[in-house]
Image (spheres, rainbow, N blue to C red):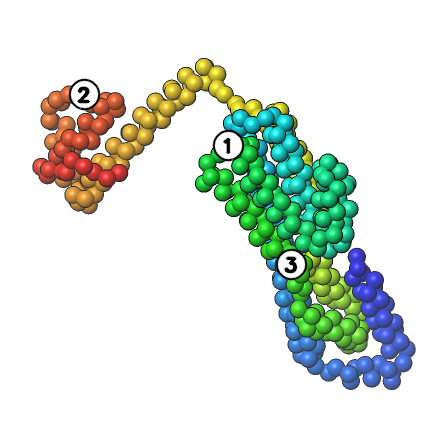
């Protein structure tokens, strides 16, 4: 839509120029002598198209990199909250202490996510009261510290780590230290994802490429109507082709501009408010009673699992025996022999008296016993 007015103006200019040339032979002759060979215009269009495609490709990569890193940050923040809630299950601390820890943790994680999105969006001194889960539940000194601090994301992340250490010392988090270290790993991953996403906002598209592309597009907009006057015979077609060529080039350039920063305020950028709302819903889910339920199986389901396990084990043993026999045959070269040898071996096996019936339940004995194929003794232990 942003490229449409410029393209329409170029088409009108081309049609008017062709109409004026049809009324004046001198002007028509002048336009015909401007460009006698279209190779120059084609080369110019190819160069400009290369710059536009190059810019569009880089912008596309920046857009998806920003999306990926933001989603990684969201996942790490939610996993941190989920793990901390789960680590409180076996705590013998006072219930009020556990609830206070979980409530503060949910508020801080929501605030952490909001601070990250605000930094990516380029906001300053943001009021988080409408974006965070009950921000007024935190003490006033902490809220003032967040408001005055430039590195909001790093400060809140440090608070979460300090709160985790204090909860472990106070007995609220009852978990082995190696497992508890996973919390700090998740927070570290969230910080890494935030920095990777912030790089898209902090490092813009190189200005020399942008400047060169814009200048070439301006020259192309001025030259196209003149060139189309030589390629067409009617003012209508001059205007149409001038409009189409200009529209394509300008549209690609505008698309690249839209994709360069996925965290801006344009209509095609990411909806950060919706992301924050979704994160709040997920964090609040951790505080609901259903999050503390551990699903169990009914006695009927347990019997069904046992039956399925026996059936699966029998099928696995059958496949294992078939594969073992085929490997032995290949090692002996029987698979490459003649049909007569194959039929002879098969006959030898069928003529041997059956010593005992081997069932799948006795598969271990069968695998440990030596097997003779064409008179060759096989090892007792076989991989597979």
Q: Position of residue 24 (x, y in %)?
A: 90, 81
Badge 1 vs badge 3, beta-carbon distance below 8 Å: no
| SS at circle 1 | loop
Q: Position of residue 287 (x, y in %)?
A: 64, 30
Name above or below for residue 197 compared with residue 177: below
Looking at marks 1 and 3 on the same chain, the residue that comes earlier in the sequence is marked by: 1
Front residue of 255/28: it is 255
Name above or below for residue 215 compared with residue 262: below
- Please tell me whether mark 2 or mark 3 is closer to you in this view: 3
Looking at marks 2 and 3 on the same chain, the residue that comes earlier in the sequence is marked by: 3
On residue 174, which mark appears? 1
Front residue of 286/163: it is 163
| SS at circle 3 | helix
Q: Which residue is drawn at 74% across and 71% down?
A: 214
Q: Residue at x 89, y 76 (%)?
A: 20
Name above or below for residue 110 compared with residue 116: above
On residue 357, which mark appears? 2
- Please tell me whether mark 1 or mark 2 is closer to you in this view: 1
Per the image, the residue denoted by label 3 is 200
């Amino acid at each position: 839509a942003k490229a449409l007015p410029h393209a329409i103006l170029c088409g009108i200019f081309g049609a008017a120029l062709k109409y004026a040339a049809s009324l004046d032979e001198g002007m028509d002759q002048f336009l015909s002598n401007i460009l006698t060979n279209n190779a120059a215009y084609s080369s110019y269009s190819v160069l400009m198209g290369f710059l536009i495609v190059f810019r569009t490709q880089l912008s596309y990569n920046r857009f998806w990199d920003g999306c990926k890193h933001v989603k990684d940050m969201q996942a790490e923040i939610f996993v941190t909250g989920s793990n901390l809630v789960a680590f409180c299950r076996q705590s013998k601390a006072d219930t009020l202490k556990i609830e206070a820890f979980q409530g503060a943790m949910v508020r801080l994680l929501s605030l952490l996510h909001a601070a990250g999105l605000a930094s990516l969006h380029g906001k300053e001194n943001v009021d988080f009261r409408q974006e965070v889960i009950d921000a007024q539940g935190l003490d006033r000194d902490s809220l003032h510290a967040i408001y005055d601090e430039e590195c909001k994301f790093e400060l809140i992340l440090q608070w979460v780590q300090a709160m985790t250490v204090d909860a472990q010392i106070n007995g609220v988090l009852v978990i082995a230290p190696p497992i508890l270290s996973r919390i700090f790993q998740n927070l570290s991953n969230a910080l890494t994802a935030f920095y990777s996403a912030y790089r898209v906002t902090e490092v813009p598209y190189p200005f020399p490429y942008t400047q060169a592309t814009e200048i070439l597009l301006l020259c192309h907009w001025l030259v196209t109507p003149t060139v189309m006057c030589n390629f067409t015979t009617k003012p209508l077609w001059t205007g149409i082709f001038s409009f189409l060529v200009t529209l394509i080039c300008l549209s690609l350039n505008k698309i690249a501009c839209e994709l360069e920063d996925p965290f801006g305020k344009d209509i095609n950028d990411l909806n950060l408010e919706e992301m924050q709302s979704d994160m709040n819903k997920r964090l609040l889910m951790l505080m609901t009673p259903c999050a503390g339920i551990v699903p169990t199986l009914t006695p009927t389901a347990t019997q069904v699992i046992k039956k399925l396990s026996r059936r699966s084990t029998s099928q696995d043993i059958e496949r294992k025996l078939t594969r073992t026999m085929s490997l032995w045959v290949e090692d002996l070269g029987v698979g490459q022999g003649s049909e007569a040898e194959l039929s002879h071996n098969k006959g030898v096996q069928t003529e041997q008296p059956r010593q005992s019936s081997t069932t799948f339940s006795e598969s271990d004995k069968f695998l440990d016993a030596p097997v003779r194929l064409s008179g060759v003794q096989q090892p007792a232990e076989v991989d597979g």
